[in-house]
Image: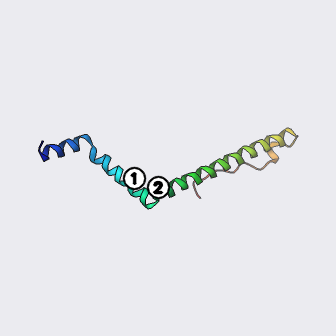
Amino acid sequence: MEIGSLIQLVSALGIGAILTKLFEGIFQWATGRSKREHDAWQQRDTEAKKRRQLEEYCHQLRHDLIDLGLDADDLPPWPTYSNQP
């Protein structure tokens, strides 16, 4: 098999893209970038879990106050979400 045919076969099979991703992954692992990205996602997940737990607690507290006789109109309104940090 000559070199031209081999290059065509490799490019047809997409091995070049696979090798590029492989080298990129090795580079990220070597520089520690992959671990930092994983830690950042884990921190976001932890914060989101805490926020959901707090929202559930607030929801239950509002219902308990209404069940105890407080008028729903006397409670402050739910905060609105925005895309601003």
Residue 16, label in figure: none
How far across and down, in percent of the image, does residue 71 sit?
84, 43
> Image point 42% across, 59% down: which residue?
30
> Image point 34% across, 53% down: which residue?
23
Is there a contact, CB below 8 Å, between mark 1 and mark 2?
yes
Element under disc 2: helix
Disc 2: which residue: 34
Element under disc 1: helix
Indicate whether 60 appears above or below 31. above
Indicate whether 53 appears above or below 34. above
Disc 1: which residue: 25
How far across and down, in percent of the image, does residue 2 sit?
11, 44
Which of the 4 quarters of the picture holds residue 73?
top right
Could you give the CA–CA distance between mark 1 and mark 2, rounded to whole angstroms?
8 Å
> Image point 50% across, 56% down: which residue?
35
Indicate whether 63 appears above or below 43. above
In the displayed orientation, state which residue is furthest to the bottom. 31
The amino acid at mark 2 is: Ser
How far across and down, in percent of the image, does residue 12 sit?
22, 41
Q: Nearer the viewer, residue 67 or 25?
A: 25
In the displayed orientation, state which residue is furthest to the right. 69
Q: Earlier in the sequence, mark 1 or mark 2?
A: 1
Screen quadrant of the C terminus: bottom right
In the displayed orientation, state which residue is furthest to the top. 67
Tell me if 55 is positioned left or right of 44 in this view: right
Screen quadrant of the N terminus: top left
Q: Nearer the viewer, residue 81 or 34?
A: 34
The amino acid at mark 1 is: Gly
> Image point 37% across, 54% down: which residue?
24
